[in-house]
Amino acid sequence: MITRVLLLSSLMLLGAFDGPGQQQHGRHPHGKVAYASNGCNACRMHEEIRALSLEAIKEQILSKLGLKQAPNMTGRALPRIPPISKLMDMYGMQADQPQPLEPGITHHEEVDEFAAKTETVFALAQPHQRLRHSKGSLDVLYFKFSDKIIQHRVTRAELSLWIWGTGSRESGDPELDQETEGPVSITLQRILRGTTESGGPLLGPPLTTKHPRPLERRGAWVTVELRRMVSEWFKHPRDNLGVALKISDGSHRRNSRLVETNPGAEFAPYLEVQTQELDSRRGARIKRNVGLNCDEASQETRCCRYKLTVDFEKFGWDWIIAPKKYDANYCSGDCPMAFLPAYPNTHIVSLAEPPNNTGPCCAPRKLSEITMLYFDNEYQIVFSRLPGMVVERCGCS
């Protein structure tokens, strides 16, 4: 019986019984967790609740990210692209320092959401064959997106390309480097289905941009705006055949090494795509209320919030880039009638319950989000906000 009670409590921690748009504050007759009078039994109970809660959190993360199982990152390395470091610095993901939980009363406002809010995707170029053309061969950049990602609306999309500088040995012939210090012309054309009358690839309208070549430097990143093209890929995924890339420097000699196009290179091309949900409806509720915080050494038996740190490295989840750990917290304790005046609305509702109902249970009453940077199953890097992953306040409901 105790095991069942603990399991239900841990699942209620992050609403494991809920789906998108559903509320998670419903009552369950077995939801109340009663502390044993013996201190050792209470410690053992906390230990079991923490273990079951961690399992529930793992399931919740996979569910909210739309993953059936944890991605396999064997042999995969984190690419060296500037936005990754920028995001980690911006959201403090490098520190991974869980915040202390101070015992006492806290005041909160409730906001409850379920689904992960994907904001940014870093799509890395995939290996692809070159296009054979009447005037030579064209490089092809191909980016694959997961089914979950393409359900969003594209608000911004930028292709980042590395232009080799004149001071780089990797750009080619040193004598050629001295002759090609002018601007680099980059032409992008969406690859369409079908072929031309001559049998060549069918390409969309050209998008040409010019960029100065870095002088006496190894190289530099340049960006090209591609929101319209990526939006079409999202609307019609089967028509995502990639983009043809043509590079020139104004000279008669073609040097493809002016721009890095190899997906396996250190400075491989990548797309940064910012997205927004197509359905902006959010099942949110706001209400002012209070909560009780406790630590493991306290003798409090009433409904209380306790600290619980989630360590992804202990899970073996190397597909999560950041954070490596965070504080999720959990709820546990009794809901005696004398404790209910702190939650007047809940008390009024409980009076209308059937006589055989065992009463309110201790459950999360306010949840907050975490930000996460991770690899998905397509080996793209995704930045998402996951709502409802941190218990900010516990209460009787």
Image (cartoon, rainbow, N blue to C red):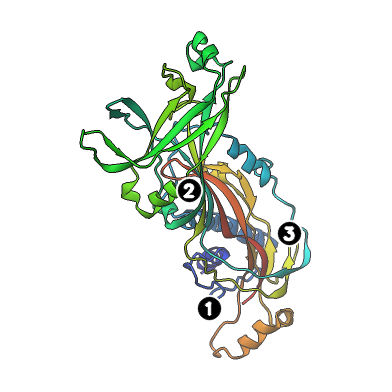
Between discs 1 and 3, the one toward the N terminus = 1
Question: What kind of element bears circle 2?
Answer: helix
The x, y position of residue 326, in whole percent, is 64, 50
Residue shown at the point (45%, 49%) measured from the top left = 228
The x, y position of residue 324, in whole percent, is 60, 43
Amino acid type for the residue under numbered disc 1: Pro
Work out how far the residue at label 1 is from the one at label 3, CA to CA, in angstroms: 26 Å
In the depicted view, which residue is nearer to us: 236 or 112?
236
| Residue where numbered disc 1 is placed | 29
Amino acid type for the residue under numbered disc 2: Arg
Name the disc covering residue 295, or none: 3
Q: Tell me if mark 2 has few (under 14), some (14-19) or many (20+) residues whose alpha carbon lies within 10 angstroms of its own.
A: some
| Residue where numbered disc 2 is placed | 227
The x, y position of residue 188, in whole percent, is 42, 36
Question: What kind of element bears circle 1?
Answer: loop
Residue shown at the point (40%, 38%) measured from the top left = 206
In the depicted view, which residue is nearer to us: 31 or 35?
31
Q: Tell me if mark 1 has few (under 14), some (14-19) or many (20+) residues whose alpha carbon lies within 10 angstroms of its own.
A: few
Amino acid type for the residue under numbered disc 3: Asp
In the depicted view, which residue is nearer to us: 340 or 70?
70
Between discs 2 and 1, the one toward the N terminus = 1
